[in-house]
Image (spheres, rainbow, N blue to C red):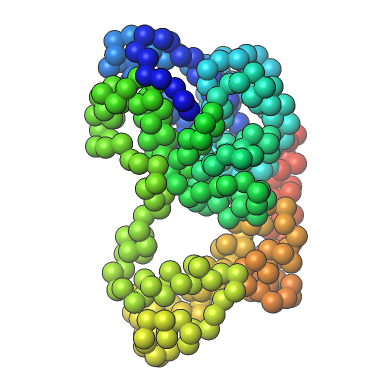
Amino acid sequence: MNIRPDIGATHTVGFLLTPNFSMIAFAAAVEVLRLTNYVTGAKAFAWRLYSPDGQPIEASNGVGLAVDGAYGDVGPMPEIIVCSGLDVQKYDHSALIAKLRKLAFYGVSIGAVCTGTYILAKAGLLDDHRCAIHWENFDSFREEFPEIDATQELFEIDRNRFTCAGGTASIDMMLALITAKKGAVIAALVTDELIHHRMRDSHERQRMELRARLGVSHPKLLAVIGEMDKRLERPVSCAQLARTVRLSPRQLERLFQRYLDTTPTRYYLEMRLNRARQLLRQTSMPILSVGLACGFVSASHFSKCYSEHFDRTPSEERKGMRVERNVATAIA
């Protein structure tokens, strides 16, 4: 962010909270600021919280939070961070987007945690900037904003835009900002106070390694699942997958049955259906386009497989999200 280390100045950070924001991502960011004040023995940082209407706002865990004002009350300050979370697409963010554009005009550094990146993108504030977003939202984000350089890094700091994947990645992004503002020694002291063990680099992976995530260590099984994940849009046959690891189809079948209690075909199909569900819930892509993006050759085949797995059709999934979005807008 081109910030020179400065021990003395007090920086005010504004947190703009949206309905259902991620509490862990927000709290992690604030705690880094609080602990910086603690280890320096000075008011290095101040922070103010804002909601759409200035009223208390609920996080995705149902905990309500009092705020200092409404979006309309936000004035220029050194940094602004948009905190969002589940189902960010359900809500009308027009007032927030208008405020962010105005703040950007005044040169405010603007960041986001978790799905707050989506709102920055809608505001046009990530054009020609790298950005990070939670892995679960990455594919839908890339479909909606193909021109934006989105990554699956823990966080990205690109000039006066800073974004992170959410969760505990907020800690690492804020520690990187503390390093730039207050120096590496102070950032290390804060890291110790957090019992965080080390400041993770932005390039570290968001998700656990497949080995740990599945509780499986068989290298050929992991290699096949990795290939499946790369080929969701254009699936290949199990025979082809088996050949990539020099197994027969029957040997591959036994591996999946032994370690995952399913068949390769079923596992592959469920991966594609789960990806389709994310796209249906997080984007406005036509249903047929979602099906094609997940390797289904026709709308009828996609609908049949989806209904059998989720007990609702893709159109019912989309309709359900639309109803939730209308309710959320009415409440807001």
Q: Residue at x 72, y 35 (%)?
A: 92
Total marks shown come to: 0
Q: Residue at x 74, y 47 (%)?
A: 323
Is residue 121 rendered to the left or right of residue 77? right
Up the image or down, 298 lies above or below 180; here it is: below
In depth, the one of 67 and 98 nearer the eye is 98
Q: Quadrant of residue 245?
A: bottom left
Up the image or down, 284 lies above or below 257; here it is: above
| Residue 111 seen from this side | no
| Residue 252 seen from this side | yes
Is residue 288 rendered to the left or right of residue 125? right
Q: Position of residue 208 (x, y in %)?
A: 36, 55
Q: Quadrant of residue 280?
A: bottom right
Q: Residue at x 44, y 22 (%)?
A: 3
Q: Position of residue 58 (x, y in %)?
A: 56, 30
Up the image or down, 321 lies above or below 245; here it is: above
Is the C terminus in the top left, top right, bottom left or bottom right quadrant?
top right
Is residue 192 rendered to the left or right of residue 277? left
Q: Position of residue 225 (x, y in %)?
A: 43, 71
Q: Position of residue 86 (x, y in %)?
A: 57, 42
Is residue 261 rendered to the left or right of residue 269? left
In depth, the one of 140 and 281 nearer the eye is 140
